[in-house]
């Protein structure tokens, strides 16, 4: 086919390249026709080069070539119009030269089918085919009844080829273009989906790391703050006890540095395999560390029965750690109770309660502690409740499912609503 050159005018393309190609091809064949007629007298009467009939045919071919450029804008008008304008040649008896008018129709049908769905062009295509067959029949030279039948059959076949071939190739080209566009859009959608999944994964990792960092800082730094306050009171009255508190501050500082190094190691994919994962058995050591820092904590751990899975135990450990840190900050001097209940009906309950503080509350905190506990609980299918007690204290209660149960949710859609009690926002 002829080269296509697209010039876009908004959403209405022009095809000057196709128009130029069809015009050059048709005029070139018209120039060659007299020589071909001399070599083959069976072609019949043809317009003489430079004669009036020849120029008439040339003008029609040029008009058709110009109209081809507008096929993309109005194919319903241009396609039958190209076949209709050729009928003006019938009075000049162009003979075989009339066939050259089909070149522009052929190119225009191809462009039309590529630009518009074929189902919307059946009317214009049918009209163009009828006009082509009529013009070809009227410009033929039938002799006798048999000649009329042959001329009619030839005209119909030519119209079928001129319309059918570009219709077929145009439909294939349009289908391949649409398939390519569909693949492009599908790839673009997949890229957007992958980007969204990546951003979601990054967001989940950031949330997990922020929880870990918050727990590390809240647990150790609250203990260091308590010990520092005790040293300030003991340094003059009881130097030996103050030295012991300073040593505990040093131990707590080393512990927080070790935990921070472990967190950085996780970011570098250099996990410390020798460090065990915190479990319910480690709660006793956590309580002892708090007691050594001067906190009054009662631990109630009955004989162990069926235990939750490792991830659920880590959630429980972090809940106790965060709750004790909150109690130290927002209920200074209050006695605390850590209780791990008996497994019942597939659930294990862990609670942390503190009494009435003996010192003023330093003020509201960030609130990320309770949010982090709620997120962890939802991750393993547990229930988390928290709120004030009847005696003016505070309690955090976690119900863990026994066995390893992990939520299929990638990230919690909604978190349990934090209590409207003003003290909830200080935790």
Image: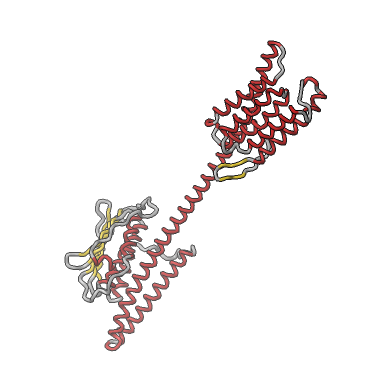
What residue is shown at x 59% (from left), y 34% (from top)?
112
Residue 310 location, quadrant: bottom left
Task: Work out whether 250 lies above or below 125.
Answer: below
What residue is shown at x 39% (from left), y 72% (from top)?
256
Work out whether residue 17 or residue 345 is closer to the camera in this orientation and state it.
17
Work out whether residue 261 or residue 143 is closer to the camera in this orientation and state it.
143
Single out the residue that lies furthest toward the bottom. 236
What residue is shown at x 61% (from left), y 36% (from top)?
111
Residue 38 location, quadrant: top right
Q: Position of residue 208 (x, y in %)?
A: 40, 61
Single out the residue that lies furthest toward the right. 39
**Total of numbered circles in the picture?**
0
Q: Position of residue 79 (x, y in %)?
A: 60, 31
Residue 67 location, quadrant: top right
Quarter holding the N terminus?
top right
- Visible in this render: residue 175? no
Q: Position of residue 86 (x, y in %)?
A: 66, 27
Q: Position of residue 334 (x, y in %)?
A: 23, 72
What residue is shown at x 28% (from left), y 56% (from top)?
383
Single out the residue that lies furthest toward the left. 390
Task: Work out whether 299 lies above or below 59.
Answer: below
Colouring mode (rainbow / by chain / secondary structure / one colour): secondary structure
Quarter holding the C terminus?
bottom left
Q: As drawn, is 372 to the left or to the right of 156?
A: left
Task: Work out whether 33 lies above or below 271.
Answer: above
Single out the residue that lies furthest toward the top. 145
Work out whether residue 306 or residue 396 is closer to the camera in this orientation and state it.
396
Task: Work out whether 8 lies above or below 47.
Answer: below
- Visible in this render: residue 335? yes
């Amino acid at each position: 086919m002829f080269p296509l050159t697209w010039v876009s005018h908004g959403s209405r393309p022009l095809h000057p390249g196709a128009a130029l190609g069809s015009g050059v091809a048709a005029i070139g064949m018209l120039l060659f026709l007299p020589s071909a007629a001399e070599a083959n007298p069976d072609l019949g009467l043809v317009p003489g080069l430079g004669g009036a009939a020849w120029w008439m045919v040339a003008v029609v071919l040029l008009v058709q070539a110009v109209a081809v450029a507008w096929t993309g804008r109005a194919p319903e008008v241009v396609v039958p119009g190209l076949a209709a304008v050729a009928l003006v040649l019938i009075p000049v008896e162009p003979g075989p030269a009339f066939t050259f008018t089909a070149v522009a129709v052929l190119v225009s049908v191809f462009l039309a089918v590529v630009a518009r769905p074929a189902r919307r062009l059946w009317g214009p295509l049918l009209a163009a085919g009828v006009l082509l067959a009529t013009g070809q029949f009227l410009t033929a030279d039938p002799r006798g009844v048999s000649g009329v039948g042959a001329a009619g059959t030839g005209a119909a076949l030519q119209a079928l080829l001129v319309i059918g071939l570009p219709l077929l190739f145009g439909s294939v080209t349009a289908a391949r273009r649409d398939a390519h566009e569909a693949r492009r859009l599908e790839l673009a959608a997949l890229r957007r989906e992958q980007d969204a999944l990546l951003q979601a994964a990054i967001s989940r990792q950031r949330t997990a790391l922020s929880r870990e960092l918050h727990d590390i800082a809240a647990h150790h730094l609250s203990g260091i703050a308590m010990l520092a306050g005790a040293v300030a009171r003991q340094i003059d009255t009881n130097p030996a006890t103050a030295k012991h508190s300073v040593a505990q501050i040093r131990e707590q500082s080393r512990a927080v540095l070790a935990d921070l190094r472990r967190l950085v190691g996780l970011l570098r994919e250099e996990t410390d395999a020798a460090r065990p994962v915190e479990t319910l058995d480690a709660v006793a050591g956590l309580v002892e560390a708090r007691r050594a820092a001067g906190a009054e904590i009662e631990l109630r751990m009955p004989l162990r029965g069926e235990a939750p899975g490792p991830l659920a135990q880590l959630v429980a450990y972090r809940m106790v750690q965060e709750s004790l840190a909150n109690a130290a900050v927002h209920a200074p001097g209050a006695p605390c109770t850590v209780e791990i209940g008996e497994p019942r009906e597939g659930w294990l309950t862990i609670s942390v309660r503190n009494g009435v503080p003996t010192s003023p509350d330093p003020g509201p905190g960030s609130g990320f502690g309770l949010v982090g506990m709620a997120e962890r609980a939802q991750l393993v299918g547990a229930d988390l409740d928290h709120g004030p007690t009847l005696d003016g204290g505070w309690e955090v209660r976690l119900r863990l499912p026994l066995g390893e149960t992990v939520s299929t949710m990638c990230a919690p859609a909604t978190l349990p609503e934090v209590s409207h009690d003003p003290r909830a926002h200080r935790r």
